[in-house]
Image (cartoon, coloured by chain):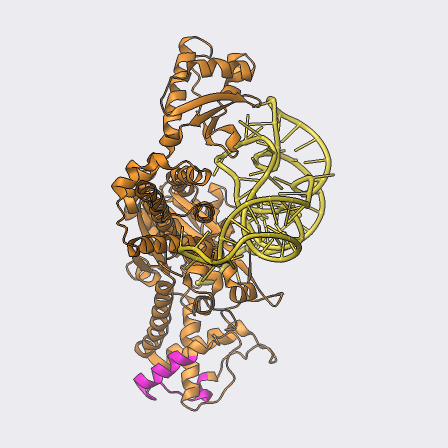
Chain colours: A orange, B yellow
RNA sequence: GCGCCCAUAGCACAACUGGAUAGUGCAUCGCCCUUCUAAGGCGAGGGUUUCAGGUUCGAAUCCUGAUGGGCGUACCA
């Protein structure tokens, strides 16, 4: 309907050009909007106001000229000029109900569009280091990323979801060493655990399975482990960083490469499989778990550095290799290979993003915590230096959720082991409520997450309001059957003309908005728009439910009403699916 | 210091990306269950969109400045 009006207006613009009211060269964007106030009709355009300058006449006068040119269409009841020069279109009620048939014939496909034009997109999200369980801070990125991916898929993109696994580097060595030290405790050794080690309970769990698997073959005495290592902080001349690094070296030397590797992979695999399970339980799945180690071992990183060297984008200073990111507007140049010969995380990332494009994706979407925002310019710089288009990368930043409990702000640190895990949140409020809660707001908006509220008053979560609307429809349809009525959508569709109440017309109007909401939300990566839309649609349904009885004796009227609400049921289901929320048949 | 993000009702957030009288939920107050689930509906109150300028037919939205908050500014990951 909206497109139809846009088409009519485009024709009008053409005629205005022929009449030389506006210059031939002008190509105005024709805006058609859904009106907020029904007094303004169903659709409105600001065309007259936009062209007022080019035409050299006041907006209302131009509007009159435009209205005179609008072709007669059966679906349009009347056209009015209002306010400063808006042109309002009033659509026939019967035309509004046409959407019901579309919904019922397209079913799960209703709302799909082709703004993606089949372009392939890689959505990388969560990508939390496998050094511990996911906490509620990761939850937002997970819920947002999964919804964005679903949204893009519905909007006609070919979507792949990927989790980048940082299974290399110092943090992983700290993890492996922490696990090994806990294992030594289990073997009866006593010592002070390093302040910079990982202290969560899950470390013990891994150590225990290590002990089950290897017995005491990995045991070394605390004396030989700590001999010659820089003391921990708190001691004289102590340094927590040097302390843990010293322990890592000792772990590697005392265990030997093979055994160290066994501890290392036991730790990573255990945590990673826990993360996978956790995310799956949250309804978040990935086509690919991309390993940083694999990137290193297959020489992709070295190849990337060589490519940059060949392009003269790398220089040496102070024993380290630097990338000239300032050539591309970054604040300063960045190290890719450190003085000690180790490559930085940034080096991996250059190679990783290059690799993504080499895999043939047209668009790359990275979802990062907003604390990484300073990282965007250097990655884009690298892409440019690698001779790829930096605009192919879209970085979506997600503000961290600030947790409150009992009015207090909660500090979160993986290292200290004191945090609320995503799993705990799910256990407390449930998957649906958590998924919905996270995507209710714009991603770059700060979010206050009051745990007490989430737990104690979970009924306040609007997700129940939407699910309730869906469940109500399901129950009505079931009860209609139980009363011996046979639902026949064909009869219902033929009888839609009987529907004329305010609530019924409103529902039809809402249903018709869904496809364009999806398209718009997808283009700007804003799943919260779907959440808000679903609230509106649920509200329209609840209002209707209270105003009219659906299961009535009059066969045609009953069929018409049931047809209308079953199309609402379908759209609620489609929308909730994008958000990863279930559509229960009863509550 | 410099850079990025944010600021809307008591609270948490929307506002079709520049449109008409700024909306929704919670909270507050009043009404509606012998009728398909009251996890619902109907209604009321609540605003100088942080402040000051600017751009134009028109600004919560764009520009400049100020104020307040978050984050970043590593040869960490």
Image x and y of residue A131, in percent:
42, 69
Depth order, front residue of A410/A483? A483
- Residue A565 in the magenta stretch? The answer is no
Quadrant of the snapshot with the C terminus of chain A = bottom left
Q: Which residues are magenta?
A: A204-225
Image check: A325 left or right of A257?
A: right
Q: Quadrant of residue A393?
A: top left
Q: How many marks?
A: 0
Image check: B1 left or right of A397?
A: right
Image x and y of residue A428, in percent:
47, 68
Compared to residue A235, the image places residue A92 above or below, namely above
Compared to residue A485, the image places residue A197 above or below, namely below
**Residue drawn at x 36%, y 65% as measured from the top left:** A281
**Residue drawn at x 33%, y 74% as measured from the top left:** A261
- Residue A212 in the magenta stretch? The answer is yes
Q: Quadrant of residue A391?
A: top left
Q: Predominant secondary structure in magenta?
A: helix
């Amino acid at each position: 309907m909206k497109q139809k009006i846009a088409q009519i207006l485009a024709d009008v613009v053409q005629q205005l050009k022929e009449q030389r009211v506006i210059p031939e060269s002008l190509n105005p964007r024709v805006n058609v909007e859904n009106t907020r106030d029904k007094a303004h009709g169903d659709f409105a355009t600001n065309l007259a106001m936009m062209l007022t300058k080019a035409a050299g006449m006041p907006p209302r006068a131009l509007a009159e000229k435009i209205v005179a040119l609008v072709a007669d269409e059966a679906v349009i009841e009347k056209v009015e000029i209002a306010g400063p020069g808006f042109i309002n279109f009033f659509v026939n009620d019967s035309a509004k109900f046409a959407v019901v048939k579309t919904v019922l014939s397209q079913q799960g496909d209703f709302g799909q569009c082709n703004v993606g034009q089949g372009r392939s997109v890689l959505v990388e999200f969560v990508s939390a280091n496998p050094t511990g369980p996911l906490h509620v801070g990761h939850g937002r990125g997970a819920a947002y990323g999964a919804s964005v991916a679903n949204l893009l898929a519905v909007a006609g993109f070919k979507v792949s979801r990927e989790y980048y696994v940082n299974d290399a580097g110092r943090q992983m060595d700290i993890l492996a060493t922490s696990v090994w030290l806990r294992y030594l405790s289990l073997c009866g050794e006593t010592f002070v655990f390093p302040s910079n080690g990982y202290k969560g309970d899950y470390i013990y769990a891994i150590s225990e399975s290590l002990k089950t698997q290897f017995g005491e073959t990995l045991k070394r005495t605390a004396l030989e482990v700590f001999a010659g290592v820089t003391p921990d902080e708190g001691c004289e001349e102590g340094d927590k960083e040097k302390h843990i690094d010293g322990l890592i070296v000792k772990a590697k030397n005392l265990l030997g490469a093979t055994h160290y590797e066994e501890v290392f992979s036991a730790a990573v695999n255990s945590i990673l499989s826990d993360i996978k399970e956790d995310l799956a339980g949250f309804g978040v799945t990935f086509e690919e778990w991309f390993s940083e180690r694999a990137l290193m071992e297959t020489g992709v990183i070295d190849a990337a550095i060589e490519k940059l060297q060949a392009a003269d984008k790398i220089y040496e200073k102070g024993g380290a290799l630097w990338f000239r990111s300032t050539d591309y507007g970054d604040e300063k140049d960045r190290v890719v290979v450190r003085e000690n010969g180790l490559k930085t995380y940034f080096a991996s990332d250059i190679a990783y993003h290059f690799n993504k494009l080499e895999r043939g994706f047209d668009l790359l979407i990275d979802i990062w915590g907003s604390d990484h925002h300073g990282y965007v310019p250097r990655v884009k710089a690298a892409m440019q230096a690698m001779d790829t288009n930096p605009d192919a990368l879209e970085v979506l930043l997600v503000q961290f959720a600030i947790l409150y409990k009992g009015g207090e702000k909660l500090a979160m640190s993986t290292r200290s082991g004191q945090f609320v895990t995503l799993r705990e949140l799910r256990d407390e409020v449930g998957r649906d409520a958590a998924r919905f809660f996270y995507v209710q707001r714009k991603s770059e908006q700060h979010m206050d997450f009051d745990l007490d509220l989430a737990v104690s008053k979970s009924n306040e979560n609007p997700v129940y309001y939407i699910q309730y609307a869906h469940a109500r429809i399901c129950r009505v349809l079931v009860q209609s059957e139980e009363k011996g009525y046979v639902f026949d959508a064909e009869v219902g569709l033929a009888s839609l003309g009987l529907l004329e109440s305010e609530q019924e017309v409103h529902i039809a109007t809402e249903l018709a908005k869904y496809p364009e909401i999806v398209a718009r939300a997808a283009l700007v990566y804003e799943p919260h728009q779907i959440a808000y839309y679903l609230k509106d649609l649920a509200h329209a349904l609840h209002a209707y439910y209270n105003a009219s009885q659906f299961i009535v004796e009059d066969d045609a009227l009953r069929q018409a009403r049931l047809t209308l609400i079953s199309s609402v049921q379908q759209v609620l289901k489609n929308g909730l699916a994008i958000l990863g929320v279930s559509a229960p048949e009863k509550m």
